[in-house]
Image (spheres, grey):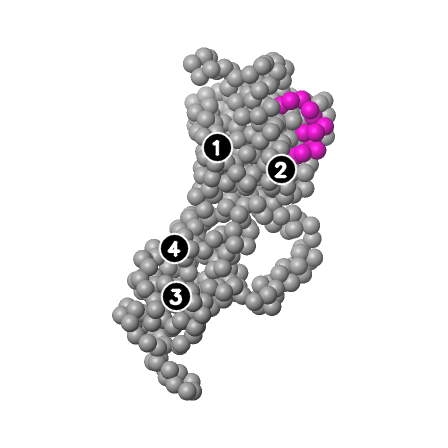
Amino acid sequence: MKQKILQVNHWVVDIRSGELFAASRAHDVSLASATAHGRLEPKGTALLTILAESAGQLVDKESLIDKLWPGQVVTDDALTRVVSRLRKSLEDDPKSPEIIETIPKRGYRLIASDVTWLQDGLQRDNLVDAKPKESPSTPAADAVVARPLSNAKPAPANHKKTWIAGVAVALLLAGAFGFISDKKNQTDTHFAGSDVHTLVSQADDYYAKMRRQDNEMAIALYQNVIAMRPDAGVGQAGLANALVQQVLRWPNPAGEPAVPLATQDLSHALASGRTVTPDAKLKLERALALAQQAVAHAPNDARAHKALGFVYAAQQQFPMALASYADAIALDSNAWDALINTGDVLEISGRLPEAMTYYERAFEAMGRVYNEQSARIHPWYADMAALIGDKYVKLNRYQDAEVWYRRTLRIAPYNFAATKGLAAVLKNSGDVEQARQMCQAYKVRIGDDPCQI
């Protein structure tokens, strides 16, 4: 029968009820000194059990999600929140963990120095009052294993060094890509699983909606992040991005007419002079200082370098913008926002053929991380593919444009821009009837006529 009492360092958990007991941290103190310390939530109890069954080993996110939410579709954020609450209950600092270690982008590992399954059937009273039974030889089958309870970290020669050596070999085999992908999350491990992580995730989701009200909410949340963790860099990077968006998209006071949606991009903002007004200059100077702080605090975080590049682009310092975007992409090859922004700067600089490589790389990167960032990518994913088709039309590369329009319609069968673009390409190639049929199908299904053929 599976044992139901788990000891992790100085903590004792009744797996059946989630009841948590804390023993003295003093050396050689037995379970007799354990006192009630609240109750773990069911998901936290289950998570601790899973990790304990593979103590010292990585348990990947996918496996944890499958076991904690069988048959359900949940995001990594749900798992992160469970880990966060469990860490709080176990008083485990995510910045210097003694119990649960985050392996960036991969999963979690129980690193407690003492993990013991105690006798099955042990009752609550035993945890508080009973002295463990001992004998000069091997403990009896129904006895509690008497072991010192301590919060001591593993000795330097223990499993941490072994794991680090294993990772070093894995990195050599995996090459630069794996190294860079993990490297970008080094800063994230300082706040992952905390309230700061939740605020950042919420702020990022608001920011991604690209609406004035949502951008203002993102600004407020990023400011809270900075107040909570001024040394993390993530709040500064997010706030810098949001301030640049204010300049580009919503330069007018809230009560005045908004800038037309079609002209809210960087190119139109620069052409119209929105980025050089006194108010805009002040905001961009503040954004620059924030982005520079972000890079200083988190030099290995791709989003910090992307934010700095975004500010430079708005200030028309294009070489510096491209250099910062390149740093972001070097740190994270899936930094699709930095790839898009690189293409944007190249296109504004009259280098559209060169920009196309970055636009295509951005779309591929979005596909690779879609499941992880679906809330941020979904609104733009199909439109990004259609936009690439539009860019190829500008270059008179109609076959390439047709490929991208059809690719868009495979993932979004009634995308307006792709339907319109493909119909135009077909008409120009002499296939008017196919274009007409496609437009008619769109009109029947959606109600609008994107083609007017």
Which residue corresponds to mark 3? Answer: 24
Which residue corresponds to mark 2? Answer: 295
Residue bounds of the magenta highlight: 314-325
Q: Earlier in the sequence, mark 2 or mark 3?
A: 3
Q: Is the C-beta separation of discs 4 and 2 under 8 Å?
A: no
State the separation of the CA atoms marked 3 and 1: 40 Å
Q: Is the C-beta separation of discs 1 and 4 under 8 Å?
A: no
Q: Amino acid at mark 1?
A: Gln
- Magenta-drawn stretch, dominant element (helix, strand or loop): helix
**Of all residues shown, which one is farthest toward the bottom?**
137
Q: Amino acid at mark 4?
A: Ser
Q: Is residue 324 magenta?
A: yes
Which residue corresponds to mark 4? Answer: 89
For the C terminus, give its image quadrant.
top right
Q: Of residues 32 and 110, which is closer to you in this image?
A: 32
Label 3 vs label 1, nearer the camera? 3
State the separation of the CA atoms marked 3 and 4: 16 Å
Image quarter of residue 160: bottom right
Which residue corresponds to mark 1? Answer: 223
Q: In this image, 335 relative to 438: left or right?
A: right
Q: Is the C-beta separation of discs 3 and 1 under 8 Å?
A: no
Q: Is residue 435 visible?
A: no
Q: Residues within 10 Å of mark 2 (few under 14, many from 20)?
A: many
Relative vertical location of residue 167 with respect to residue 325 in this rendering, above or below: below
Q: Earlier in the sequence, mark 1 or mark 2?
A: 1
Q: Earlier in the sequence, mark 3 or mark 4?
A: 3
Image quarter of residue 148: bottom left
Q: Residue at x 67, y 29 (%)?
A: 321
